[in-house]
Amino acid sequence: MTEPRTRKLVVARLIVGDDRRVLISQRRADQSLPLQWEFPGGKVEPGEAPTAALARELAEELGVTAVVGRIWDVLFHAYPTFDLVMLVYVCRLAPGSAPPRAVEVADLAWVATTDLPGAWDILPADRPLVDRLVEEGPPA
């Protein structure tokens, strides 16, 4: 009998700027999948609502407050050692929020969706988002 695989629930935020570019962040060198780029997000802790996890992660990683919108996508990715389920929410920076800064990430970039493929080393779990953004453009 095989051991059941660990399943992690994470939230990601698709932060869309007024100019329709999206915000991506680079993982730190001391993390798994080092220096790859992703849509900012993180794990949902036990007993934590996904939207509360988003607010917490935004403050911790980017030092911002955001307005959380609707779920835009739900993704599944099987990494070698665990399964990942990702809820992707559309977010905008809250009025008066400080600009995003690299607090717990290596770097940040505002990127036009058409520039995402090929130019950025995007995490495997986030690549379907890149494909959808290129095809449909960022959500309104």
Image (tube, grey):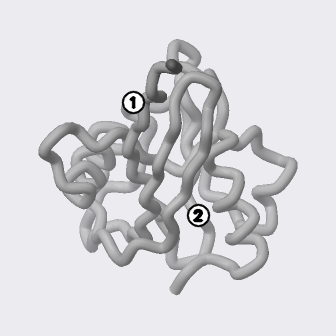
Task: Write down the residue under mark 2.
Answer: 22
Image quadrant of residue 36?
A: top right
CA–CA distance between discs 1 and 2? 19 Å
- The residue tagged with tag 2: helix, strand or loop? strand
Q: Earlier in the sequence, mark 1 or mark 2?
A: 2
The total of numbered circles placed on residues is 2
Residue at the extreme left of the image, as rendered: 47
Is residue 120 toward the left or the right of residue 6 in the image?
Answer: right
Query: Which of the 4 quarters of the picture holds residue 134?
Result: bottom right
Residue 43 horizontal/vertical position (percent): 34, 39
Q: Residue furthest right?
A: 118
- Which secondary structure, mark 1? loop
In the displayed structure, 116 sits above or below 79; it is below
Label 2 crowding class (10 Å Cα cut-off): few <14, some 14-19, many 20+? many
Q: Residue at x 24, y 60 (%)?
A: 51
Mark 1 is on which residue type?
Glu
Extreme front residue here?
1
Q: Which mark is residue 79?
A: none
Q: Residue at x 26, y 56 (%)?
A: 50
Residue drawn at x 46%, y 52% is 86
Disc 1 marks which residue? 104
Residue 79 is situated, as x and y percent measured from the top left of the image, at 62, 32
Q: Residues within 10 Å of mark 1 (few under 14, many from 20)?
A: some
Q: Are marks 1 and 2 in contact (CB under 8 Å)?
A: no
Give above or below for 115 relative to 45. Answer: below
